[in-house]
Image: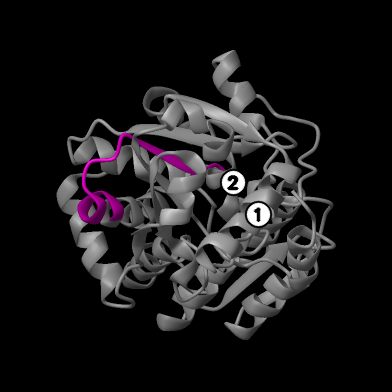
Amino acid sequence: MFSLDDLEAARRQVHAVFPGTHQYAWPLLAARTGAEVWVKHENQTPTGAFKVRGGLIHAERLARERLAPNGLISATRGNHGQSLAFAGARHGLPVTIVVPEGNSAEKNAAMAALGATLIEHGADFDAARVHAMALAERDGLYFAPSFHRDLVLGVATWAHELFTAAGTLDALYVPIGLGSGICGAILARDLMGLRTEIVGVQSAHADAYARSVAAGHPVEIASADTKADGLAVRIPNAQALDIIRAGASRIVTVSDDEVARAVRIYWTDTHNLAEGAGAAALAALLREGERQRGRRVGVALSGGNIDLALFRDWVSRAD
């Protein structure tokens, strides 16, 4: 998809906007797991999630090559839309975002505050995506997909930062939505010549990639009924699947209850706010604690954009 020179140039481009994010080895997480746990804090980006990195790379190229003269449109549950709105505003690109009906009110408000025009359509992300593609053709807008070389290149910079700062990691747990985050991690690892095991994490209620890896081809599932909305994807991307099959050691699926527990642990052990998808990697590590005992392990806290009502519900539960 890209070279190490491309990745390092993308990192410089991202750092021209914000200075990367921190990574810390948290002692209370080590006590829970028996591993040295490095958290990559993508909840610290300007939009509260890792996807802004890809948006910055994509929007810059669209503006430079004049590929979106009438603006761009995309579909999202929230973080991809915030990324495009943030980056589009920097380059004077009008951004329209289609979200599914009943989408997070707080993520909708964040996208609108960043300048996006919002349209609600469909029962889930995939229905919203089909509608966005139809509107793109009707209105002469550039359709910005959720998986694209620019996006993977941009988000790979979080893994490049982590691998550079944390040193050799034995394993890295990465949540899977449509796949840009884990594909970026796999490609960054390979370009840097590392041997870190990459473990994908999906919701047990939205396990299209886990089923697809087992089947050896893309498998569409009937529903993606999870409160971890960043993981709620029914239809896997074929290109992402190829990269995951070649580069990930396995996919772990976690329940919403396990994700809720990881959200609580992030709050108590690090005082960081994690959304469902952002806590999924830690949930998987907690599931596989014995397997990683005594090792150096990374987890991607991919975002912190959780609605207050859901946060209250999840943190008030007893373990």
The residue under label 1 is 276
Q: Quadrant of residue 307?
A: bottom right
* Residue 280: mark in rendering: 2
Q: Amino acid at mark 2?
A: Ala
Task: Give me the residue at 72% from left, 74% from top.
Answer: 106
- Work out whether residue 84 or residue 250 is closer to the camera in this orientation and state it: 250
User: Above or below — where is 14 with respect to 130?
Assistant: below
How was this image coloured? one colour
Query: How far from the left and from the top, in percent, is residue 226?
Result: 76, 46
- Asked whether residue 86 is in view, the answer is yes
Q: Amino acid at mark 1?
A: Gly
Is 219 in the magenta? Answer: no
- Work out whether residue 272 or residue 164 is closer to the camera in this orientation and state it: 272
| Residues rendered magenta in the picture | 162-177
User: Above or below — where is 162 with respect to 3?
Assistant: below
Q: Is residue 42 left or right of residue 17?
A: right
Q: Is residue 139 left or right of residue 300?
A: right
- Mark 1 and mark 2 in contact? Answer it, CB < 8 Å: yes
Query: How far from the left and from the top, in percent, is residue 125?
Result: 72, 51
Classed neighbour count for the residue bearing mark 1: other residues with Cα under 10 Å, few (<14), some (14–19), many (≥20)? many
